[in-house]
Amino acid sequence: MSKAIPKRSENYSEWYNELVKKAGLAENSAVRGCMVIKPYGYAIWEKMQRALDDMFKATGHVNAYFPLFVPKSFLEKEEEHATGFAKECAVVTHYRLKSNPEGKGLIVDPEAKLEEELIVRPTSETIIWNTYRNWIQSWRDLPILINQWANVVRWEMRTRIFLRTAEFLWQEGHTAHATREEAIEEAQKMLDVYAEFAEKWMALPVVKGVKTPNERFAGAEETYCIEALMQDGKALQAGTSHFLGQNFAKSFDVQFMNKEGKLEYAWATSWGVSTRLMGALIMAHSDDEGLVLPPRLAPLQVVIIPIYKGEEELAKVSERVEPIIADLKRRGITVKYDDDDKQRSGWKFAEYELKGVPVRLAMGMRDVQNNTIEVARRDTLTKQTLPIEGIVDHVENLLDEIQQNIYRKALKFREENTFLVDTWDEFKERIEKGGFILAHWDGTSETEEKIKEETKATIRCIPLDAKQEEGRCVYSGKPSKRRVLFARAY
Amino acid sequence: MSKAIPKRSENYSEWYNELVKKAGLAENSAVRGCMVIKPYGYAIWEKMQRALDDMFKATGHVNAYFPLFVPKSFLEKEEEHATGFAKECAVVTHYRLKSNPEGKGLIVDPEAKLEEELIVRPTSETIIWNTYRNWIQSWRDLPILINQWANVVRWEMRTRIFLRTAEFLWQEGHTAHATREEAIEEAQKMLDVYAEFAEKWMALPVVKGVKTPNERFAGAEETYCIEALMQDGKALQAGTSHFLGQNFAKSFDVQFMNKEGKLEYAWATSWGVSTRLMGALIMAHSDDEGLVLPPRLAPLQVVIIPIYKGEEELAKVSERVEPIIADLKRRGITVKYDDDDKQRSGWKFAEYELKGVPVRLAMGMRDVQNNTIEVARRDTLTKQTLPIEGIVDHVENLLDEIQQNIYRKALKFREENTFLVDTWDEFKERIEKGGFILAHWDGTSETEEKIKEETKATIRCIPLDAKQEEGRCVYSGKPSKRRVLFARAY
């Protein structure tokens, strides 16, 4: 079959690239590092957006929109933030082109140079906090609970579709609060929202934790994160939520009159997930036949394929299938009846497997005679023939079962690939094979950096549920009070 | 009241600016010409997006996402298109900042100059048709029916919030077809979708027409448009749909094998509406008290305000109101019960009038005794006291009635302000007073330009329903076969 993709076991990286391409999810564009998200990929992203947006609104947030451009002077204001993003900024310097006086085409008009360069937002803390200054005068104006769906640009040198692209789509929440405690609570609440979305919608088990100072967002006092394990044993950071303290309020002079009548700087959070989640979704569940999508995010949940020769047989199948389609739709299940006669059923089977459609129904003449239908599930690649009666109930339950099963499978994989490691030799050996390593760490950046240098492993997070446990740092042998999560990561 | 806005009759322009600000819709940002869309304004835009997106999908379109950046060489390829957009391009020339070696802050790193400048998309025909080249080989690959929700940048010199901003949000449909006829049909179909959205959702009557060659989109063979009349007598172009012929296919070499086995260039359309519609919505319906929103686009459709003194009275009102709220919500009507005791009811009344909430219910102690409730409608600013029994049915019907009434009112206004004009003197006099003018035109660009120079009026469109009618050009006296629509425009 022409659509075949490499096996995961042979070349995981190529498997991913080919799958993204052949399943019609996305492709590289003519602009370095920028991707085209194709309709099927975008349909999955839309489902993610809708689910997340509902969760944000249910937790009291509203959407708004802030400018694409950040004046260079804004970026400079918060020093760590500036240092963190300066190296990957797309810079707008001019606002006009003109005809080339010396030949064909257009040139940048040197007369149209901006007084101050504009940065295409890599993230919007600065432009948003500059705006909040005018919105926040009193404690009565707080909290501000705003989210934005937007594109951002970070000029990454090595890009990888969905996982690391120069332009990507995301949402960024930016909240302002009257107290430190309330801001921390917000940052943690949104981490919980992300974890719930990952587990309930993406069927992706995640470890909730905090980043070490080295791995914090530039400008944050604390970065919370969710970390997932991919099938090749590498970790993927699936979402972050930052407690920003008063850093941005101070840089942009956002003060409010508190209940005691005193001026105080506002407390901030920001939190985001991006189209990177598409990469996580693909790499966590899919197999050598193609995509495996959790039903709650599948653009198409059920496909029905008639097996027939000639119009008359097709008509018989269609007649049986019609009430099933109507009933599925009534229940809010997305279904497609693929009676396109330009493709053979074998080709269709492979195509929908590649695209990860959770449930495939097929009906041939024997089924018509026997009042049966063939039900195939994508997650296990198994099938069975069932009576037509009750089939819609069965499919509805099956979609739930598939959603659960994909999660259980990923959880089992993670459990089998999470290791308690206590010696440096074991660590070095283990990290080569992939997986999460829970090991003691002495809490210093020095040790963290040395481990990274020697093994390419980073501390993914200090898990929120880490037990207090006396131990010795796997690298330095110094005392440690709890294990942290190491892995090589995307 | 501090929230008062200027009267339309005194200063329409200031009325608009203040209304946008005081109703919390949007504000200017620190970046020249770029706006911040505030939560209440964005909530309206989200309702527009949802309705339009559903209509696009119902007509067979799917969403996708293409890069923010357009290489300069792409823009150059279609000559008219290039000329049309060159003067208002935000140009990215560098991809990195660095610490200023001579002092504080960041400077653009001269080492990080792009080989080819990137333009922040002013529209995406070029980047999309460059992509379509790889997607289109055979007639079987056609049609491609794709839409994109995105931000775009056009460096306008004179900006006006929502109406003309350097960055705006929009959707842009880009379709590819095997035949000229099919592409024209698509462009017309999407014009109909826009007109239906304007009339059914925005309650905005529009004239469907085609642009004169002078007013066409840069690169189009035909531009269809919908034109609306604002309350100050100026026209506003509310949406455009372009038949692009084979221009972009030729510029980007997009050829396909047709059914006869011959290579042919693909046929294109593009169509878009933007956050400009927010301006149209505001200017078409609102009054001196504030926004008037059609219920189908109002983020909040019903507000309920208790009139009380003390907790005990409030409890009595709340008890009566609770089942009403529950019933409204069950019917999918958005409702807010505003029992905030920090504000007086008079302040609340004015506030919700300013924000254009279509229906306001108020209940005081007399109502509690009499089993009644006060119902006020925003469109007519009238109110009546009604029995509680049946109130939810009444409100549901009232929302429909308000939707209809706003449309009828706008239609009546347009009809009363559309004039058949046959002499140049009358034209010059009439145009000063505003409104649509239907007049004969000789069909030449020269005359069109002279009329514009002398009166600032432009040909908004040649209405699709224009009758064949012998006449003489209002300016040149030369023969004409039908009237065209003139107005001063936003």
Image (tube, coloured by chain):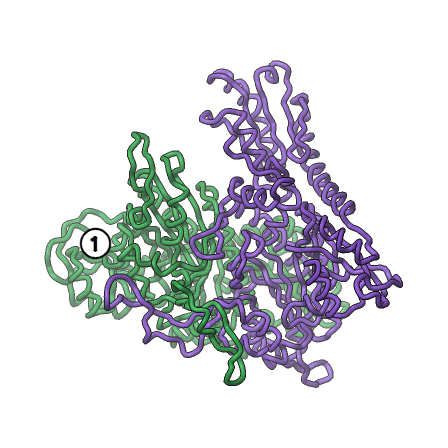
Chain colours: A purple, B green
Q: Quadrant of residue B33?
A: bottom left
Q: List x then y, in percent, for residue A411.
A: 75, 45
Above or below: residue A252 compared with residue A281: below
Q: Is residue B70 left or right of residue B483?
A: right
Q: Answer whether residue B284 is visible to the viewer in this image.
A: no
Q: Quadrant of residue A296?
A: top right
The one of B233 and B94 positioned closer to us in this rendering: B94
| Quadrant in the picture for the C terminus of chain A | bottom right
Query: Mark 1 — on which chain does it sit?
Result: B
Q: Residue at x 32, y 41 (%)?
A: B255
Q: List x then y, in percent, for residue A338.
A: 51, 29
Q: Name the residue furthest right.
A: A470
Three-letter code for the amino acid on which mark 1 is drawn: Arg
Q: Name the residue furthest left.
A: B478
Q: Helix, strand, or loop for circle 1?
A: strand
Q: Residue at x 42, y 64 (%)?
A: B279
Q: Answer whether residue A308 is visible to the viewer in this image.
A: yes
Q: Is residue A164 left or right of residue A383?
A: left
Above or below: residue B426 compared with residue A266: above
Neighbour tally class for label 1: few under 14, some 14-19, many 20 plus, Cα within 10 Å: many
Instruction: Read off the residue under disc 1.
Output: B483
Q: List x then y, in percent, for residue B461.
A: 27, 55
Q: Residue at x 61, y 52 (%)?
A: A277
Q: List x then y, in percent, for residue A58.
A: 67, 57
The one of B8 and A289 positioned closer to us in this rendering: A289
